[in-house]
Image: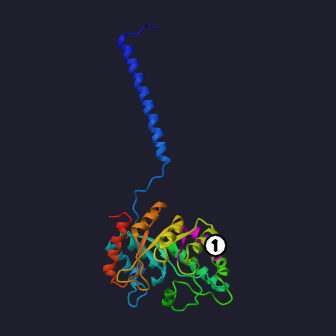
Amino acid sequence: MEPMNRRQFLRHVGTGTVLASGIATGVHADAVAQKQNNTPQKSKRTNRIALATYSFWRFKDGLKLTMEACIDQAAEMGFDGLDLLHMQMHREDDAYLRDLKKRALINGLDLCGLSIHQTFVSPDKDVRRRNVEHTIRCIELAYKLGIPCMRLNTGRWGTTKNFETLMKNRGIEPPLAGFTDEDAYPWVMESIEQCLSAAENCGVLLALENHWGLARTPEGLLRIVKGVHSPWLKVLMDTGNFLENPYDKLEMIAPHTVFVQAKTYYGGGIFYTLDLDYTRIADILRRHNYRGYISLEFEGEEDCKTAIPKSLALLRQAFGGT
């Protein structure tokens, strides 16, 4: 081997130093990246805000808008999506469903939720069977509309005939004579289980709401969801349906939540009024990495033309939108 001159030696040493430095830097970068990957990161995404079509109607005489009008007004007000109340649909034929999908697309709205009414709280097997059939039919409607999530209730005993009386009683009603709530839990879980195959086949996630009946408490709601134990049954969080100590209860159901309906009460509530802290609720949901929709359910006495835009601004601010 020929001896190196001074210039060759310095070039050789310099190259080695650079290589060693590069290797060390790369190892350090890999270590930092690995550490970052193992550290939970808060999502920078904001929640999209939808409008529940119920917000226009609120079961008040003369206010039941068509779905076409709901789509147009929601888009004009600046919402990202629409959460359809099944009872507001005046048709279910395929041509009507296709027209709704097209109208929503043209208006830049996602059809993101379908809320239905059914009850599985009945000792009558035939009543439960009919409600299962209704639920499956609605799952298929959601599929045709391209809606990925459908709201369920447990249903209730129906021993309180007047809804205003039910509200005065904080959603509590006595069971049918000879029965208890313990009898009803298996009815509800078995009925939901009969709907799961249709939900999976259609790709429609079922979301059980903390509503009246067995899901009036977080314990009752989670007992059903955990008892069914299916990836196709999760929780719909309604922010206005826990009437006492709501935040601790919302925290309990947040880990299982896939859809949120957020109530506002401008002008005073139709049935009751809650002073909800949406910044606090947003913090609860962020802690559990909730990235899904926030669907406004306006339930106040104020004209919806002024109350709904105010509600949208409130939710945008709380959930990080503009």
Quarter of the picture containing the C terminus is bottom left
Residue 194 within the magenta-colored segment of the rendering: yes
What residue range appears in magenta?
189-210
Residue 317 within the magenta-colored segment of the rendering: no
**Looking at the image, which residue sits at the far front?**
245
Relative placement, left or right, of 189 versus 45 is right
Name the residue located 46 percent from the left edge and 46 percent from the top edge. Answer: 36
Residue at the disc numbered 1: 193
Q: Pick whichever, 255 or 149, lies toward us.
A: 255
Residue 158 location in percent, x, y?
A: 58, 88
Q: Quadrant of residue 192?
A: bottom right
Name the residue located 62 percent from the left edge and 87 percent from the top edge. Answer: 175
Residue 41 location in percent, x, y?
A: 45, 53
Count of numbered marks: 1
Is label 1 in a helix, a strand or a loop? helix
| Amino acid type assigned to the residue bearing label 1 in the image | Glu
Could you classify mark 1 by the number of other residues whose Cα lies within 10 Å: few (under 14), some (14-19), or many (20 or more)?
Answer: some
